[in-house]
Each structure stands twice: as C-alpha cells, then as structure tokens.
Image (cartoon, grey):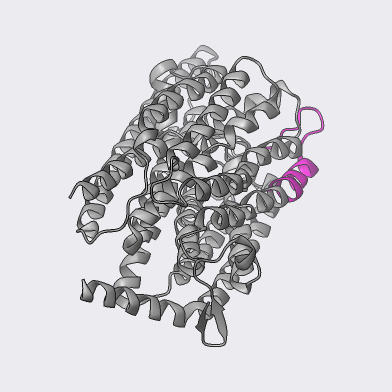
Amino acid sequence: MERVNTKWVAAAASIWIQSFSGATYTFAIYSSILKSSQSYDQSTLDFVSVFKDIGGTLGIFSGLLYTAMTSTPHGRGGPWVVVFVGLVQWFLGFFSSACGGDVLVRVLGWSLAAVFNTASVVTAARNFSDYGGTAVGIMQGFLGLSGAILIQLYHAVSGEGNPATFILLLAIVPTFVIFLTMPFVRVYETVKTSDKKHLDGLSVISLIIAAYLMFVITVQNVLGLSRALREEKQTLKALDHPVLDATVLLISPSSNIIPDGDHVVREDSNILEAMSTVNFWLLFLAMLCGMGSGFATINNIRQIGESLRYSTVQLNSLVSLWSIWNFLGRFGAGYISDTFLHKHSWPRPVFMAITLGVMAVGHVVVASGLQASLYIGSVLIGMAYGSQWSLMPTITSEIFGIRHMGTIYFTISIAGPVGSYLLSVKVIGYFYDKVASKDDNSCFGSQCFRTSFVIMASVALFGSLVASVLLFRTNKFYKRLVAKRSLKWFVN
C-alpha cells in the first residue's frame, strides 16, 4: 500500500512540474516587441523562434541521463536528478535573459522544458504502464496548460506589464515550485492497483482546471473588448466621427523483436536498434509534419493576428486559449486512445493519422482568411498538435519498450524543431517577407500567410498518410499487445 501511495505522490509532483515548465508556449507574448526592438524581418524572427524549438533536441541528453539514473532499482540517483540539472540551467537562462542577456541566451531557458518533460512523462509511463496513454496524456496535458497558467500569473502580477517582467517571473516562480516538488518524482515497480479509477479522477481534475482557465480567459477577453469599445467611442466622438459598428472590432477582416506479419517490432530497443527500423523513421517523419507545422503556427500566431488587425486583448486571448486547446489534445488523445485500445483493440497510430488530418483542415481554415478563421483554425490545430505530444511518446514506449524510452522519445522529438525551421523560416518567413512593406517589415491582410498555410495543410496531410502506413505496419502487434495485457490482468 505504501508503494501505491508514493506512486501517486510522484504523479502529483510531476503535475506541478509540468504546470510551470511550458515557457515555450508563451513566446508570442513578447515576440512583437522582440521584432520591433531588434528590427527583425519575419524570417529572422522565425529563425530566433526555432531556437526555442531546438530545445527538444536536448531531451536526447536528458533521456540518456534519465536512463543512467534509473537503470538500477536502488541506485543513488533517480528522475529528480534529471529535474535538478534542468532546473539549474532553467534559472540561469531566464534570469540572465531578464537582466539583459543576448536573445540567444534565452535558448538555454527555453530548452529546459524538454528536461522536465523527460522526467515527468517517462516516470508516468513506467509507474502506470498498463494505462500509459492516459498517464502520459495527463502529464502532457498539464504541460500544455502551463502556458495559460503562466500568462494568467503574469497578468495577476503586472496587468499588461512589460515583457522583461514576464521573463523575470519565468526565472523565479517555476524555479521555486519545481525545486520543492522534484524530490518526490521517483519510479516505483508496478503493482496491481486501481490505476484506472485514480487516473480517471486526475483526468476530471485536469478538465476542471482547464474549464476554469477558459472561463477566466473568456471573461478577460469580454471585459477587455468592452473597455476597448468604450475608448474607441470616446475617441471617435472627440474627433466628431461616426462610431464604428461594434462587430467590426470583434472579428477579423476577411480581406485578402516481435514479428508483426512481415514487419518487426522490437521491445526494449536501445536508440541505435530503434533507428535501424522503418517504424522509427515513419514516426519521425509523421512528427516532422505534425509537430513542425504546429510549432510554426504558435510561433507566428501573434503576427497572423496582427496582420488581420486583431486587438491586443484578442491576441493575448489567442495565446492563452491555444494552451487550452493544446491541453485538450494532449489529454484527450491519451485518454481516448487508451479507451479504444483496451476496449476495441484499435492501434494507437490510427489516432495519429486522424489528428494530423484534422490539423490539415485547421491550416486550410486559417489560410481562408475568413472572419474568425484564426480562432476556429487555432482550435483545430492546437488540439491536433497537442495530440501528437501524447500519442508519440506512448507509441514509442509500446513499439520500442520502456527501458530506453526517454532517449528514443526525444530523438524522435528532434523532428519538431527540424519541421519548425523548414516551415517557419523557409515557408512562412519567406512568403511573408515577399509581400511585407519594405519600410517596417509589416503586412496586413489575409494574403500575408495564405500561401504558407496552404503549404502547411499539404504537409500535415502527408503526415497523416505516413501515420497510416505506421498503422498498417503495427496493426497485428497492437492486437497481441492487448491480448498480452488482458492475460496479465486475468492471471493477477
């Protein structure tokens, strides 16, 4: 019973860590000021944003460290060592940046979410192996929510505030919270418990938190728009101009080795063994398309809104709401894929194929430039993007085994920043700068991002087809996996 209780303490500690380590999703809060203060064009800003995405590659090293610290049941280390190493770098990166450090110094802080994610996600997958999809979904979900949590904390501390204040907040508050909770993140041998019941309870709690944050963001948005409308009316009256219709300000303008049939699935593969399989590269390519286009969207969401003449209130709400959709995708994909896997033997990659298809639709909606298209598109893209962060690590642990999951998982995660660079810099930045004003590097109208998002829709659709190939290759493996788990529970 003691092991059961401590396993849930470890889960609670991981949730706290995930809830304060999603700084990578708040880049849009200060990206416009970074662009103007440094006189960047869109391509250069996108290039800088890619550096925060490259942080995922540091997860390879945290994965290796995690494996070393947890390779023996009673070793002197543990997952908390990985968290501590990341915490030191997190504080140094953000604190030096807040004190006026070079822009690229921020990369050190941005990248450390990968280190925390290693400890939380892999530990959850090991402690709750039979319901890994749900456990990983909860952990990834709270990482997605952390963007909204950090932004709400920022508003509480300084209102509209100063971006430098936000960077300082990122240096201090998460450091304090993570330092207090990291000793409780540990791996425990799996014992027969009512994991499903308790995980369902955690799921309900996470949904309540998400609903509360969404309510707060919506209220802030409504109050902010009301205030903006009053100020606009007063200004127009003072200038003796007719008052604009309120709906104009509320919407954007529409202007422009287990055999699997003929294939092989290797359990407990190390990184080299995993990389020698076709399944690894299919997963990598699917993530390049999905995570890459998702990164490119969130990196540019503020500039897209500005091109459609969204207000500051609307732009901040978009960034916060993205965290909600991101959370719902991360949590929902893990929970739903677990349910269909256990009850209907559906292979998990089927949900990867579906969500990448949904992402393609979201990109088409944004490309349309219609009224409120950015709101609707961000819902679809955000949920589909979040789903990949839940599905990919779980599929990795099932196909390649749990022992080296951390290293393999973050090696595949390299696909995210690679895709982000290609789509952010070589696609979005290139086409934006072609139509932008040469004087101030600005662009207004739907034509600013239309071509880029049509291309990204094609990329996401291609990723869906790649995931479908992985689905057919692993179909028989998943049927045997379900039968194996069912037999284990029957024997117990």
Who's the residue at 43% across and 40% down the image? 76
Who's the residue at 51% across and 16% down the image? 235
Who's the residue at 69% across and 44% down the image? 448
Seen from the viewer's position, the closer of residues 253 and 312 is: 312
User: Residue 309 lies in what quarter of the image?
Assistant: top right
Seen from the viewer's position, the closer of residues 45 and 11 is: 11
x%, y% of residue 351?
45, 67
The correct choice, above or below, for 250 with respect to 430 in the image is above
**Residue 441 magenta-drawn?**
yes
* In the displayed structure image, the side of residue 149 where residue 26 appears, left or right: right
* In the displayed structure image, the side of residue 416 where residue 40 appears, left or right: right
The correct choice, above or below, for 118 with respect to 334 in the image is above
User: Residue 451 lies in what quarter of the image?
Assistant: bottom right
Q: Residue furthest top?
A: 238
Who's the residue at 53% across and 57% down the image? 362
Magenta range: 424-444
The correct choice, above or below, for 313 with respect to 18 in the image is above
All told, the count of numbered labels is 0
The correct choice, above or below, for 392 with respect to 66 in the image is below
x%, y% of residue 481?
39, 76
* In the displayed structure image, the side of residue 352 where residue 425 appears, left or right: right
Quarter holding the C terminus?
A: bottom left
* In the displayed structure image, the side of residue 63 where residue 228 appears, left or right: left
Would residue 229 be visible to someone looking at this image?
A: no
x%, y% of residue 18?
41, 39
x%, y% of residue 204?
24, 49
**Residue 100 magenta-drawn?**
no
Would residue 75 be visible to someone looking at this image?
A: yes
User: Residue 334 lies in what quarter of the image?
Assistant: bottom left
Q: Residue furthest bottom?
A: 261
